[in-house]
Image: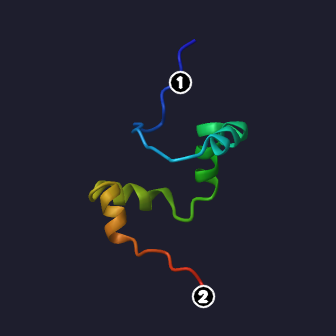
Amino acid sequence: MPRPKPPAPLKARFVRLSDRQFIIFNHLGGAGWLRELLEKKDPFPKKYYDAILKTGGPNAIREQTPPIQERV
């Protein structure tokens, strides 16, 4: 049975995890669980991200978004 086509083009991203963390990640549901969590916890509307991607991609996000400052 073929896999369903993803809703958007997928790019390889690398996250550094220990073996223990990787096992936990897979027990939680792996990439599917992470995608679902990101959609659920999304702080901005989808149009916001589409506009950023049209203006320069992921690097534009770093340039336009100020870093989050921790509370002291």
Q: Secondary structure at mark 2?
A: loop
Snapshot quadrant of residue 18: top right
Q: Residue at (70%, 42%) from the top-left corner?
A: 24
* Colour mode of the rendering: rainbow
Q: Is 33 above or below relative to 66?
A: above
On screen, residue 7 versus residue 63, left or right, reads: right
Say which of 27 and 62 sits in front: 27
Q: Which mark is residue 72?
A: 2
Q: Residue at (58%, 11%) from the top-left corner?
A: 1
Outermost residue to the left: 56
Q: Amino acid at mark 1?
A: Pro
What residue is disc 1 on?
Answer: 4
**Dot 1, how many residues are within 10 Å of its Cα: few (below 14), some (14-19), or many (20+)?**
few
Q: Residue at (43%, 39%) from the top-left corner?
A: 8
Q: Which mark is residue 37?
A: none
Say which of 20 and 41 sits in front: 20
